[in-house]
Image (cartoon, rainbow, N blue to C red):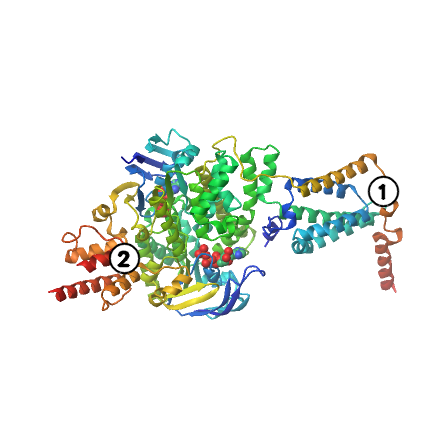
Amino acid sequence: MSLKILEYFNYLEHKSPMHYIDPRGKTLFIIAITCLTIYLDQIIPMCIILVALLPLIYFGNFMKRWLKSLLFLIPVILLVVILNALFLKIDYPTTIAIVLGLRLIILSGFFGLIFQTVSPDDISQTLIKFKFPYSFAWAISTAYRFIPTLAKETNIIIDAQKSRGLQIDRGNLFKRVRNMIPLLIPIFATALRRSWQLAEAIESRGWNATKNRTYLYSLKLKWWDIIVILLSLTLFALFLYLAIADVSLPFWMVYKIPERFELKRLFLIAWEWIKNLFSK
Amino acid sequence: MIEFENVFFKYDPKTDYVLNDITFKIDKAEFVAIVGKNGVGKTTLIKHFNGLLKPNDGIVRIDSLDIVKEPISKMASIIGFSFQNPNHQLFAQNVKKELEFGPKNLKIEESVRDATIQNLVDTFQINHLLERSPFELSGGERRLVSIASVLTMNQQILVLDEPTYGQDYRQKKHLGLFLKKLIEEGITVVVVSHDMDFILDFIPRTIVLSNGKIAADGETVKVLSDQTLLQNADLVSPLLLDLCYSLQQIDDTFTTSINEQEVFENILSMLSKKQKMSR
Amino acid sequence: MVETAIKIDNVSFKYRNADSFALKRVTFEVAEGEFILLAGFSGSGKSTLLKCLNGLIPHFHAGRFGGTVEIFGESTLESDTPQLAKQVGFVFQNPENQISNLTVEREIAFPLENFGVPKNEIISRVDELVALLNMEEIRYRSPYSISGGEQQLTAIAAALALDPKILVLDEVTAHLSPRSAVHILTLLNELNKKHKKTIIIAEHRLDRCLNFADKLAFLEKGQLKVFGDLQAVFQSKEFPTNMLPKIPSLFLKLDKKIGLLGDKTSTIPLTVDELVATLNNR
Ligand SMILES: Nc1ncnc2c1ncn2[C@@H]1O[C@H](COP(=O)(O)OP(=O)(O)OP(=O)(O)O)[C@@H](O)[C@H]1O
Ligand SMILES: Nc1ncnc2c1ncn2[C@@H]1O[C@H](COP(=O)(O)OP(=O)(O)OP(=O)(O)O)[C@@H](O)[C@H]1O
Ligand SMILES: [Mg+2]
Ligand SMILES: [Mg+2]
């Protein structure tokens, strides 16, 4: 089902070393990496970042899920790469297209990793540290936490209505849309009821009793977080340096697919060849 | 009617089996209870009845159809299925429309449908709820409506997941008697429940699940009087049985019964015997 | 003298969209330390009445509210729900929908955090509650990975965190397997007897609570029909026979036939043991 996509954004409870890194560090890191990845437009730097990403994904216990999600992404990425290589009107279109593909793969890995290892609590604590009001932080983290519950519940609702003889994929378009009603209403109603009951419960536990709320746990930076933050800042500085000073990369990093391997050219050669084959 | 042959099932390849080699058979017009502690896999088991879940290994046959091969829409015409949480199925503007939804899907004739609904409304005395929105009912009322909305479909097999929770004594009795009548009409009923007293009162056969296996399967009285079994499966014995066994302690001629009326009479005869002795 | 914990005076309530009143002129008093069973057919207004006790009605639910509810002499109309949370702990039926934190420990700490209790005090209070309810094993677990019974235990612990004098529970055993249900009820009895909590609980399976409840309130269509000692209630004509729990029901039937009450005993046995003892003594 399409709900599988939601799984990609789920917080994974299995603790991995990546889980112990402060969410603020992780956020900084992903900002720096994203900037770098988008700015750099050469194949070799991309490959370096990709190689650096692999151990992180491995230690985040995310390898299997990432590879699985790539299985779906790769066809899309390939299409994007081929179309760009064929139709981009600049020098070295194939190189640029490949960089684009690598960029997508890298970003999917980093963002997936962050989503898997940042808990809803981390999110709210981060927001609180940045001086957002507690109720806002709570709402965000609770919404995030209920994504998997919602997905599970939706499946049960589909099951329940199917058992009452509802046929979702039958009939013309109008009928199909109408058949969605018995699914959509309980989905919204349960979500609504759940939030009401939750609101009742927290109300009964002294919600908003005082402005000076305390916390049993709050985020504290450990030595490894400092390292992560320093590393992120270095990467970010590197990005700024490259972008502002407009320096050129060392020659060994600038590898371009040679003219004779341009996809467009290969394509034309193949085309000629096939034409010859038939004209004979 | 319902056949499980060495069924294995787990949700996640990394975990243990939730159903670990389950084999049993339920005949036509049988009335069966499935019990076990929270999270043992009762809901998982009954979801195999209409193919909502498919076994990893083994065979499930319903009415001699292999559920792996049949579409759920077909199973829906054979099996009525009431889910644990009423909120997962209520959607209509009012209770009446909710009750009509299933029969309409199965294209049941209008006159038959209306008669069935009227019968149910009378049995459960829910006339006053018909025009109300299902979302503004009390917890117990919602549960009752969700059960009734499945009973309207007149299927050959009925599967009810915890139908008695939130129900008062009166409604439990109505439900028990109604189901018994269905059994007499040849319908097969399977009930998952935590309510040992309800089971003893109405359901003759009980299957106990424990650690993914069937820990016991047989006559309800026998199953529910096995203390070690109950202990292991996190169950308690029904009050009436408790009473009978305690009475046997003071008078070993006291005959155990699972019928309240019979227990009543047995106590009367025990008391009169005692009176004669003391004279 | 025992203090009055809850005073409900002429309380009526109508939900916003409803045609009729869910509560109609309900009046009764609960003394501190009592254990009250709230019984009634489905839809009779039990949950509605309980929600009046901690101010969810009328502060949280819209509708027409009349009468007064006083908790230790203070009207719920005059205090807000957080203040009432200190007096009244509330546990709901559905364990999943009342838990909002990622570990059991933090769920227990949540009310204390809300009140700005210093961190070291939170820790010692959580320690205390975990010990009291025997929750060491699940303390650091996620509430989503524990059993229904353990979730309900967590909810009770959270309700107790602010050390309220009154504990209100709405069908808390409905989703639990029988042994967990008995465990929870036994625990409530202990909280009542040992820790002097005033407890008021809505239940459908009355049988298992009879041996430790003091009083029973019976609601019908929003009206309080009977309220009083279990003994008085079960002998009252207002109490419908089809609501009677198994043992008292059996005894009263026997009594009708051969007259058990009056000659040697004037109390109705409530549990299996009591009934057997009564029959044995005859
Ligand atoms: N959709 C699911 N995905 C993964 N695991 C699940 C899913 N549904 C249930 N489980 C797990 O399978 C086990 C059996 O669950 P099931 O719901 O069948 O129990 P149950 O006997 O019906 O419990 P209860 O009495 O609480 O209703 C539990 O450990 C549960 O956590
Ligand atoms: N949100 C609501 N809006 C309108 N009416 C409601 C609402 N909630 C409950 N009611 C109605 O108020 C009455 C009392 O409901 P309440 O939930 O208090 O009953 P209850 O005694 O707790 O029942 P149960 O045993 O089924 O839980 C019922 O008639 C119900 O239909
Ligand atoms: Mg279940
Ligand atoms: Mg209720």
- Which residue is identified by label 1? A249
Q: Amino acid at mark 1?
A: Leu
User: Circle 2 — which element?
Assistant: helix
Q: Residue at x 84, y 61 (%)?
A: A274
Within 10 Å of disc 2 (Cα), the crowding (few <14, some 14-19, many 20+) is many
The answer for how far apart the CA atoms under marks 2 and 1 are is 88 Å
Q: Amino acid at mark 2?
A: Val
- Which residue is identified by label 2? C272
* Mark 2 or 1: the one toward you: 2
Q: Where does the image place residue A11, in percent across and percent down from the top left?
A: 60, 48
Kindly tell me whether mark 2's CB lies below 8 Å from ligand 2.
no
The subunit carrying tag 1 is A
Question: Is residue A117 rendered to the left or right of residue A158?
Answer: right
| Quadrant of the drawing holding the C terminus of chain B | bottom left
Question: Is residue C156 rendered to the left or right of residue A6?
Answer: left
Q: Where does the image place residue A90, in percent across and percent down from the top left?
A: 84, 44
